[in-house]
Image (cartoon, rainbow, N blue to C red):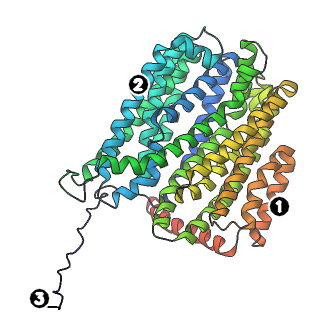
Amino acid sequence: MSSIAKPTTVLPAPAIPRTDEGVRRDTLGASVVFLIGLSCIQPLVAVARGLVFCRWLDPIQLGCWDIALAFMSLAAPLVVFGIPGSFGRYVEHYAQRGQLAMFLRRTTLATLALTLVAMAVVANGGRLFSVLIFNSPDYVDLVWLVALGLGTVIIFGFVVELLTALRMFRVVSGLQLLKGVGFAVFGAGLLLAWNLGPASLIVAHSVASLLGAGVGMYWLWATWRSLPPAAQHFEEGYLPARQLWTRLMPFALWMWATNILSNVFEIVDRTMIIHCSKLSVQEALTAVGQYHSSRIVPLLFVSFAAMLGSLVLPHLSRDWEAGRTRDVDARLNLTIKALSLALMAGSVLVLWISPVLFHVAFRGKYDGGLVVLPWTLAYCAWFGLSFIAGNYLLCAERVRLNTAALLAGLVANVLLNLALLPPLGLMGAVLATAGGKLLVLGLVLWFARMLGMKIDGGTWIACMLPLALTLGAGAAAAILAVTALTVLSTDRILVAEEKRLLLAAFEHYRARFRPASRAAG
């Protein structure tokens, strides 16, 4: 036998077919532009919708709608075990390996089966869920509508999560706007023509969600058709079920736990008002209705931050997979600072116009909401910032740390509510929520720093900026002005490189839109 090794033939690695042929994907900068454009229109729709609903409904009816929506928002991720929430992390992973078709087929079927089971359980347990949601057995008819609404919330969320993971945020922006406008139109129409109560709002929300999901399916179908066949006898397209679920489910279950805690965190104050305030059912629902009026605009800021966090995650994941962790740090620091300044500016504007909004537009029926508005704005800003900071933990696949932060904040919220709700009423519930959400933001940043994220001093300053809102409109505006001057004249908050990146992005998009404006002229 010869001792000379025979040369081996090296075969080229099989080319993985592209999964985006014929489908336009958005860059991070373009996604942010779409998000900003949406944020300029969506508040107008939401405020107009809130104006109509608050003028036509009394606080008890508004409280019923608020707590029903809270239940649907909580139950939706609970039902599907966090599967859609994992898309932002794993769609790109399986797309690069030619296994996206199998991934989508299996996750879609699993989500659909879980949704149908959940709708049946809620519909058949009407009396039980009436007591659970409203603390009264008298709302069984609403529970049946809630069962329908739960399914539509899951379907819309699934479509949005998948389109976001596919970096098609221009479509997501349009769907969010379509759902918002549809809810306003259908809600007003049903209130006038059918039922002047929460049932109309539940049905309108369900129809608007289905409309948005149906339109989104058009782009998903185009994406599906662009995928290569994932027949099981092709090695590059084959994705064994066990391999998929053993990799996906640990991440998805932590996302599931995180989403549940996040949604419980969102409704725990109102739930404790309903079940632990020692008020009558009608008085408790009235307090929830007052609280709802103070959250109409602040929740838009949370939605903006959540959408921003979702669209940033696929881009951060791409940098993380390529080993560019410094780029991840830089993007997150800049995003947190820019978002904090934007939320602060929007919140100051809301405080300035709030007397007109509550006394004139809402006919003076929701003065309790006006009192707690500054703290509501502050804690919504903190919660929104925690969505952005938490992306570092998602990239590092340490979702459990996000969950731990939310659990700590939830426990603090409950304990503070038990202490503050009886003596202070609604204000006590809002202060408890603010304390819990500030704790969540601090813990998420601390965990990210432990995992290696470089957090500069400007980021910490930006995170504490919303506290100024609790001092009133005048003081908050003055502090915002000083902060803006500091940004422009020093590198204490935005460093030189961050300013350069923002200026370059601005010049890039101004150059892109300038030819179009000249042509229009």
- Whether 375 is drawn above or below 290: the answer is below
Q: How far from the left and from the top, in percent, is residue 409? A: 71, 42
Q: Amino acid at mark 2?
A: Val
User: Residue tagged by mark 3?
Assistant: 1
Q: Residue at x 42, y 19 (%)?
A: 120
- Residues tagged 3 and 1 counted as in contact (Cβ below 8 A): no
Crowding at dot 1, Cα within 10 Å, few <14 / some 14-19 / many 20+, comes out as few
Name the mark on residue 117. Answer: 2
The three-letter code of the residue at mark 1 reads Val
| Quadrant in the rendering for residue 464 | bottom right
Q: Is residue 66 above or below residue 262?
A: above
Query: Residue at point 32% right, 52% down?
Result: 100
Which is nearer the N-term, disc 3 or disc 1? 3
Secondary element under disc 2, as helix, strand or loop, is helix
Which badge, 1 or 2, comes first in the chain's sequence? 2
Q: Amino acid at mark 3?
A: Met
Crowd class of label 2 (few under 14; some 14 to 19; many from 20; radius 10 Å):
few
Mark 1, secondary structure of its residue: helix
Q: Position of residue 85 (x, y in %)?
A: 48, 45
Asked whether 354 or 252 is in front, the reply is 252
Residue 244 visible in this rendered orientation of the protein = yes
Q: Nearer the viewer, residue 142 or 276?
A: 276
